[in-house]
Image (cartoon, rainbow, N blue to C red):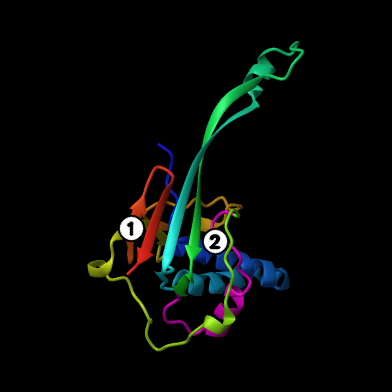
Amino acid sequence: MAARSNLVPTPYAIKMALLKVLLESQGKDHQHDFDTWIKQEFAWIRDLQIYLLPPEKLVVNRNGYKLRYYDQTADKADKNRSTIPMQDGFVFREWIHLQGELQICAGESDRLEELTQLFAQINYFGKKGCFFQFLPDATQQAIAPTFIPDPSNSFTVQPMDDFGKKTTFNRINPFSNDKAQIGKDRIIEPGFLPLQLRSTSARYDLYQRD
C-alpha cells in the first residue's frame, strides 16, 4: 500500500525550512565562525514550539499511473541489445489543495523579528512539490498562543515529527558524519488536527475544519 501524504507540514519540516533559508541568507557571512554561529542559531529554532491550524477546507486528490521506464539491470546484463530495455511500472500520487490559510504559531520567542524575516523567504515545506506563500498582513504577535491542539475537538490524527530537545545541528546535517536517531534526535508523536472527513472516495478526501 502506498504511503499517505501529510495534510499539513510537521514541526520538523517547518524548522528544517527555517534552517534552510537561514543558511542560504546568512551562512556566507559566517564562514570563519560558522560552528559557533550555527550552534546558537540552531538552538533557538530547535526549541520553538510549533502549533498549526489547518485551513477551512482541504482536499486530497489521489491518482495512480501506469508507465514504462528504462530497465537498467537488463541493459547491463545484455550489452549486445539493439533496443533499449523497458519495464512496466505503477506510481501512486497524491495532491493536497488547501482552501484558505494555513496558520503557524511559533510559540514564545525573543527572536520574533528574525523569525518573521525567515518565514518570509520560505515558499515550500518538505519536498519541493508544494507551494506556500507568506502573508505579511496576516502575521500576529501575542503574549500566548492564539490556538493550541485540543484533542477533545480534533477528529483527524497525523504523525508529527519534531527535533529532539538535545539534538544538535550536526545530527540533522546530511553532510556531517553524525547520525540522527529516531526517538532521540527526531521525535515522532501523534498530532491532532481539528478536521473532519466530510466526504471520501477512491479518488479524493474532503476535510473541513470545525
Q: Amino acid at mark 1?
A: Arg
Residue 26 located left or right of residue 134: right
* Residue placed most toward the observer, 9 or 177: 9
Relative vertical location of residue 145 with respect to residue 84 in this rendering, above or below: below
Q: Which mark is residue 125?
A: 2
* Residue placed most toward the observer, 192 or 113: 192
Q: Amino acid at mark 2?
A: Phe
Residues tagged 1 and 2 counted as in contact (Cβ below 8 A): no
Q: Which residues are magenta?
A: 105-127
Image spot of residue 186 (x, y percent): 42, 57
Relative vertical location of residue 63 with respect to residue 178 in this rendering, above or below: above
The residue positioned 57% from the left and 24% from the top of the image is 88
The answer to whether residue 146 of the structure is visible from this angle is yes
Q: Mark 2 falls on what kind of element?
A: loop
Residue 188 found in image quarter: bottom left
* Residue placed most toward the observer, 23 or 90: 90
The residue positioned 63% from the left and 68% from the top of the image is 21
Image spot of residue 173 (x, y percent): 56, 56
Q: Main secondary structure of the magenta part?
A: loop
Residue ID for mark 1: 198
The residue positioned 46% from the left and 73% from the top of the image is 104
For marks 1 and 2, give the one nearer the viewer. Answer: 1
